[in-house]
Protein backbone atom coordinates (compact mmCIF):
# COMPACT_ATOMS: atom_id res chain seq x y z
CA UNK A 1 0.00 0.00 0.00
CA UNK A 2 1.51 3.36 -1.01
CA UNK A 3 2.38 5.89 1.68
CA UNK A 4 -0.05 8.81 1.92
CA UNK A 5 1.27 12.08 0.57
CA UNK A 6 1.64 14.53 3.42
CA UNK A 7 0.75 18.14 2.66
CA UNK A 8 3.69 20.53 2.43
CA UNK A 9 3.72 24.30 2.68
CA UNK A 10 2.62 24.47 -0.95
CA UNK A 11 -0.07 21.79 -0.54
CA UNK A 12 -2.92 22.77 1.78
CA UNK A 13 -4.59 19.97 3.70
CA UNK A 14 -7.65 18.59 1.89
CA UNK A 15 -10.78 20.40 2.98
CA UNK A 16 -8.81 23.11 4.75
CA UNK A 17 -9.93 26.70 4.47
CA UNK A 18 -6.76 27.65 2.56
CA UNK A 19 -7.38 24.93 -0.01
CA UNK A 20 -10.93 26.15 -0.66
CA UNK A 21 -9.89 29.78 -1.17
CA UNK A 22 -6.64 29.55 -3.14
CA UNK A 23 -6.16 29.28 -6.82
CA UNK A 24 -3.09 28.03 -8.70
CA UNK A 25 -1.92 31.54 -9.61
CA UNK A 26 -1.97 32.64 -5.96
CA UNK A 27 -0.15 29.48 -4.90
CA UNK A 28 2.48 30.02 -7.62
CA UNK A 29 2.98 33.63 -6.52
CA UNK A 30 3.54 32.48 -2.94
CA UNK A 31 5.98 29.78 -4.09
CA UNK A 32 8.00 32.31 -6.10
CA UNK A 33 7.97 34.73 -3.16
CA UNK A 34 9.25 31.94 -0.87
CA UNK A 35 12.06 31.13 -3.32
CA UNK A 36 13.07 34.80 -3.55
CA UNK A 37 12.94 35.23 0.22
CA UNK A 38 15.06 32.11 0.72
CA UNK A 39 17.64 33.43 -1.79
CA UNK A 40 17.72 36.80 0.03
CA UNK A 41 18.08 35.18 3.45
CA UNK A 42 21.05 33.10 2.29
CA UNK A 43 23.08 36.13 1.22
CA UNK A 44 26.09 37.00 3.31
CA UNK A 45 26.45 40.35 5.07
CA UNK A 46 29.05 41.35 2.49
CA UNK A 47 26.67 40.47 -0.37
CA UNK A 48 23.91 42.54 1.27
CA UNK A 49 26.30 45.48 1.71
CA UNK A 50 27.49 45.14 -1.88
CA UNK A 51 23.90 45.15 -3.16
CA UNK A 52 23.03 48.18 -1.02
CA UNK A 53 26.07 50.13 -2.25
CA UNK A 54 25.38 49.16 -5.87
CA UNK A 55 21.73 50.13 -5.49
CA UNK A 56 22.62 53.55 -4.04
CA UNK A 57 25.39 54.16 -6.59
CA UNK A 58 22.90 53.58 -9.42
CA UNK A 59 20.28 55.96 -8.02
CA UNK A 60 19.44 59.50 -9.04
CA UNK A 61 20.35 60.65 -5.50
CA UNK A 62 23.87 59.36 -5.99
CA UNK A 63 24.22 61.25 -9.27
CA UNK A 64 22.93 64.44 -7.61
CA UNK A 65 25.20 64.00 -4.56
CA UNK A 66 28.24 63.46 -6.80
CA UNK A 67 27.39 66.47 -8.95
CA UNK A 68 27.10 68.66 -5.85
CA UNK A 69 30.26 67.25 -4.29
CA UNK A 70 32.36 67.63 -7.47
CA UNK A 71 30.94 71.10 -8.13
CA UNK A 72 31.66 72.29 -4.61
CA UNK A 73 35.15 70.71 -4.65
CA UNK A 74 36.03 72.35 -7.96
CA UNK A 75 34.60 75.75 -7.04
CA UNK A 76 36.33 75.79 -3.65
CA UNK A 77 39.71 74.51 -4.87
CA UNK A 78 39.68 76.82 -7.89
CA UNK A 79 39.28 79.72 -5.45
CA UNK A 80 35.91 80.76 -6.89
CA UNK A 81 34.07 80.69 -3.55
CA UNK A 82 34.60 83.56 -1.11
CA UNK A 83 35.51 81.43 1.92
CA UNK A 84 38.08 82.10 4.66
CA UNK A 85 39.88 78.78 3.97
CA UNK A 86 42.56 78.33 1.37
CA UNK A 87 42.18 75.72 -1.39
CA UNK A 88 43.87 72.42 -0.41
CA UNK A 89 43.70 70.69 -3.83
CA UNK A 90 44.52 73.28 -6.53
CA UNK A 91 44.27 72.60 -10.24
CA UNK A 92 44.78 69.89 -11.64
CA UNK A 93 42.95 68.55 -8.54
CA UNK A 94 45.26 65.57 -7.85
CA UNK A 95 43.54 64.60 -4.59
CA UNK A 96 40.10 64.64 -6.23
CA UNK A 97 41.44 62.50 -9.08
CA UNK A 98 42.82 59.96 -6.61
CA UNK A 99 39.59 59.85 -4.60
CA UNK A 100 37.44 59.46 -7.72
CA UNK A 101 39.74 56.72 -9.06
CA UNK A 102 39.52 54.76 -5.80
CA UNK A 103 35.76 55.20 -5.71
CA UNK A 104 35.50 53.93 -9.30
CA UNK A 105 37.61 50.86 -8.48
CA UNK A 106 35.51 49.94 -5.44
CA UNK A 107 32.20 50.63 -7.18
CA UNK A 108 33.30 48.42 -10.06
CA UNK A 109 34.14 45.62 -7.62
CA UNK A 110 30.79 45.99 -5.84
CA UNK A 111 28.89 45.97 -9.14
CA UNK A 112 30.78 42.90 -10.36
CA UNK A 113 30.11 41.06 -7.08
CA UNK A 114 26.39 41.89 -7.31
CA UNK A 115 26.26 40.87 -10.95
CA UNK A 116 28.00 37.58 -10.21
CA UNK A 117 25.51 36.81 -7.44
CA UNK A 118 22.56 37.77 -9.65
CA UNK A 119 23.94 35.57 -12.44
CA UNK A 120 24.20 32.63 -10.05
CA UNK A 121 20.63 33.18 -8.89
CA UNK A 122 19.44 33.51 -12.50
CA UNK A 123 21.22 30.25 -13.36
CA UNK A 124 19.45 28.50 -10.47
CA UNK A 125 16.10 29.83 -11.71
CA UNK A 126 16.92 28.74 -15.26
CA UNK A 127 17.75 25.23 -14.03
CA UNK A 128 14.46 25.14 -12.12
CA UNK A 129 12.61 26.38 -15.22
CA UNK A 130 14.25 23.65 -17.29
CA UNK A 131 13.27 20.99 -14.77
CA UNK A 132 9.67 22.22 -14.70
CA UNK A 133 9.55 22.43 -18.50
CA UNK A 134 10.92 18.90 -18.87
CA UNK A 135 8.39 17.59 -16.35
CA UNK A 136 5.57 19.43 -18.15
CA UNK A 137 6.68 17.91 -21.47
CA UNK A 138 6.64 14.44 -19.96
CA UNK A 139 3.21 15.04 -18.42
CA UNK A 140 1.83 16.35 -21.72
CA UNK A 141 3.13 13.27 -23.55
CA UNK A 142 1.19 11.09 -21.09
CA UNK A 143 -1.90 13.28 -21.51
CA UNK A 144 -1.66 12.97 -25.30
CA UNK A 145 -1.36 9.20 -25.01
CA UNK A 146 -4.42 9.12 -22.79
CA UNK A 147 -6.25 11.32 -25.29
CA UNK A 148 -5.27 8.91 -28.07
CA UNK A 149 -6.69 6.00 -26.07
CA UNK A 150 -9.96 7.89 -25.54
CA UNK A 151 -10.14 8.80 -29.23
CA UNK A 152 -9.39 5.20 -30.22
CA UNK A 153 -12.13 3.98 -27.90
CA UNK A 154 -14.67 6.29 -29.51
CA UNK A 155 -13.31 5.74 -33.04
CA UNK A 156 -12.28 9.38 -33.43
CA UNK A 157 -9.35 9.15 -35.83
CA UNK A 158 -8.99 12.57 -37.52
CA UNK A 159 -6.63 14.07 -34.92
CA UNK A 160 -4.90 10.93 -33.68
CA UNK A 161 -3.88 9.82 -37.17
CA UNK A 162 -2.44 13.20 -38.14
CA UNK A 163 1.31 13.47 -38.63
CA UNK A 164 1.51 16.34 -36.13
CA UNK A 165 -0.22 14.35 -33.38
CA UNK A 166 2.00 11.31 -33.97
CA UNK A 167 5.09 13.54 -33.69
CA UNK A 168 3.86 15.18 -30.48
CA UNK A 169 2.97 11.91 -28.79
CA UNK A 170 6.54 10.63 -29.03
CA UNK A 171 8.77 11.13 -26.02
CA UNK A 172 11.09 14.09 -26.56
CA UNK A 173 14.78 13.22 -26.42
CA UNK A 174 16.20 16.20 -24.53
CA UNK A 175 19.81 15.40 -25.48
CA UNK A 176 18.96 15.17 -29.18
CA UNK A 177 16.97 18.40 -28.95
CA UNK A 178 19.88 20.19 -27.22
CA UNK A 179 22.33 18.98 -29.89
CA UNK A 180 20.06 20.09 -32.72
CA UNK A 181 19.60 23.48 -31.06
CA UNK A 182 23.36 23.86 -30.70
CA UNK A 183 23.85 22.90 -34.37
CA UNK A 184 21.27 25.48 -35.47
CA UNK A 185 22.67 28.23 -33.25
CA UNK A 186 26.29 27.58 -34.21
CA UNK A 187 26.37 25.97 -37.67
CA UNK A 188 29.68 25.01 -39.10
Image (cartoon, rainbow, N blue to C red):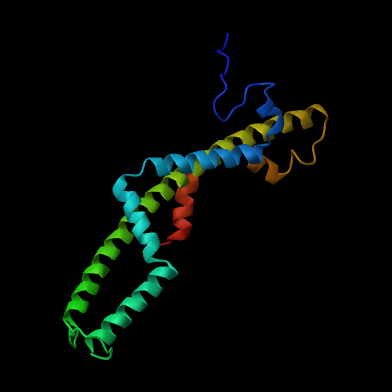
Q: Residue 21: percent from the left, percent from the top?
A: 70, 32
Quadrant holding the N terminus: top right
Give the tally of numbered discs: 0
Seen in the picture, residue 41 relative to 15 is either above or below; the reply is below
Residue at image x 39%, y 62%? 56
- Answer left or right for 102 relative to 176: left
In the displayed orientation, state which residue is furthest to the front: 84
Seen in the picture, residue 23 relative to 61 is either above or below; the reply is above
Seen in the picture, residue 138 relative to 79 is either above or below; the reply is above
- Answer left or right for 55 relative to 145: left
Residue at image x 53%, y 42%? 32
In the displayed orientation, state which residue is furthest to the top: 1
Q: Residue 69: percent from the left, percent from the top?
A: 31, 76
Seen in the picture, residue 25 relative to 62 is either above or below; the reply is above
Quadrant holding the C terminus: bottom left
Of residues 168 and 77, the one nearer the viewer is: 77
Q: Residue 121: percent from the left, percent from the top?
A: 41, 47
- Answer left or right for 114 relative to 21: left
Of residues 63 and 132, the one nearer the viewer is: 63
Which picture quadrant has residue 140?
Answer: top right
Residue at image x 21%, y 72%? 99
Which picture quadrant has residue 111?
Answer: bottom left
Evaluate whether residue 10 shows in this view: yes
Of residues 123 and 143, the one nearer the viewer is: 123
Which picture quadrant has residue 168?
Answer: top right
Q: Residue 160: percent from the left, percent from the top?
A: 74, 38
Evaluate whether residue 170 shows in this view: no
Amino acid sequence: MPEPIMPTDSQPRPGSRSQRHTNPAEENLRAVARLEERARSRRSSLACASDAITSYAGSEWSVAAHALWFGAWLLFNAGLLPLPWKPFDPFPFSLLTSIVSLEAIFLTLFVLASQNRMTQEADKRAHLDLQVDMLAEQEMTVVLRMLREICDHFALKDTTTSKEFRALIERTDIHDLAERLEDNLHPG
